[in-house]
Image (cartoon, rainbow, N blue to C red):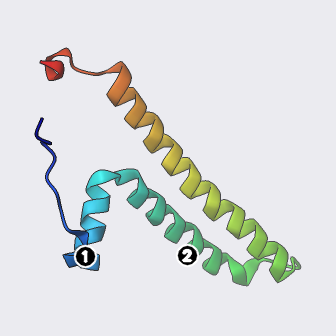
Amino acid sequence: MSNPQQIFNYTDESQADRLARKSKDSPFMIIGIIGLLGVCGFGAYKYKTRGKMSTSVFLMQLRVAAQGTVVSALTIGLAYTLVKDHLLKDDKKKE
């Protein structure tokens, strides 16, 4: 009745170690963060050429695009995990 999982003390973990661990656990989170930064960078670039659009409307549209990028990356990651764990599971792991 021993627990095969290793116990890890997270209080001794630095920010770089935490980001590395999270990227291994959930690689689509990192893709979502990179997508968020990409959308924000694109929005900062396009801010100059927004025309007569008000700043608040532009920022609202930018926020929706950034959130959509992150949510879609996490949704794709969840779908990938579900397919990998339930549809493509290996019968040899159960032994």
Mark 1 lies on residue: 11
| Disc 1: CA contacts within 10 A as few (<14), some (14-19) or many (>=20) | few
Q: Which of the two residues, 83 or 7, is positioned nearer the viewer here?
A: 7
N-terminal of the two: label 1 or label 2? 1
Circle 1 SS class: helix
Q: Is residue 43 left or right of residue 9?
A: right
Q: Comparing marks 1 and 2, which lies closer to the viewer?
A: 1
Marks 1 and 2 in Cβ contact (< 8 Å): no
**Quadrant housing residue 10:** bottom left
Q: Which of the two residues, 64 or 26, is positioned nearer the viewer here?
A: 26
In the depicted structure, whether residue 37 falls above or below residue 87: below
Q: Is residue 83 left or right of residue 13?
A: right
Q: Amino acid at mark 1?
A: Thr
In the depicted structure, whether residue 92 falls above or below residue 16: above
The N terminus lies in which quarter of the figure? top left
Circle 2 SS class: helix
Q: Amino acid at mark 2?
A: Gly
Q: Residue at x 78, y 74 (%)?
A: 58
In the depicted structure, whether residue 89 falls above or below residue 76: above
| Disc 2: CA contacts within 10 A as few (<14), some (14-19) or many (>=20) | few
The C terminus lies in which quarter of the figure? top left
* Position in image of residue 15 (x %, y %): 29, 78
Q: Is residue 36 left or right of residue 95?
A: right
Q: Which mark is residue 41?
A: 2
> How many labels, in total?
2
In this view, which residue lies farthest toward the top? 91
